[in-house]
Amino acid sequence: MTNHDRSSSHPDEALLRACRSFVARTDPTPPGVIAGALAALSWRTVDAELAELSLLQREPCISEPVARS
């Protein structure tokens, strides 16, 4: 296996981990920012969910008799 396999770490990975750890200790993300980001992500599927609900309301109920012409 080579050093560039997916199973091995990138040479800069240790440096990146150290930088992430330092930033997390010295300048942590405020809880409000995390909450806002999660709330924003919840809106990404609203259109699809509303479309699905709209389709469900349009489908005829099985228990209702279907009029024949």
Image (cartoon, grey):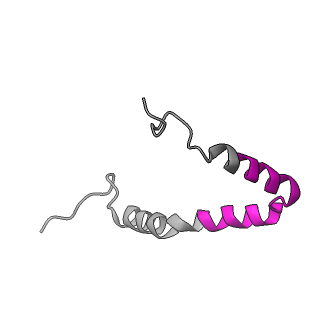
Q: Residue at x 50, y 64 (%)?
A: 45
Q: Residue at x 32, y 57 (%)?
A: 64
User: Which image quadrant for residue 69?
Assistant: bottom left
Pick the residue in front: 61 or 11. 11
Find residue 61 and report its image quarter: bottom left
Q: Quadrant of the N terminus?
A: top left
Tell me the chief SS of the magenta region: helix
Q: Provide the residue span drawn in magenta.
A: 17-41
The image quarter in which residue 5 lies: top left
Residue drawn at x 69%, y 48% is: 15
Q: Across the whole image, how many numbered discs are drawn on residues?
A: 0
Q: Nearer the viewer, residue 36 or 30?
A: 30
Residue furthest to the left in view is: 69
What residue is drawn where x is 52% and y is 34%? 8
Q: Nearer the viewer, residue 67 or 37?
A: 37
Of residue 45 and residue 13, the one placed in the foreground of this image is: 13
Q: Is residue 69 left or right of residue 26?
A: left
Q: Is residue 13 magenta?
A: no
Residue 37 rendering spot, x and y as whole percentages: 68, 65
Position of residue 40 in the picture relative to residue 28 (left or right): left
Q: Left or right: where does residue 63 sit relative to residue 27?
A: left
How far across and how far down the image is residue 11, in percent? Answer: 59, 44
Is 2 situated above or below 36? above
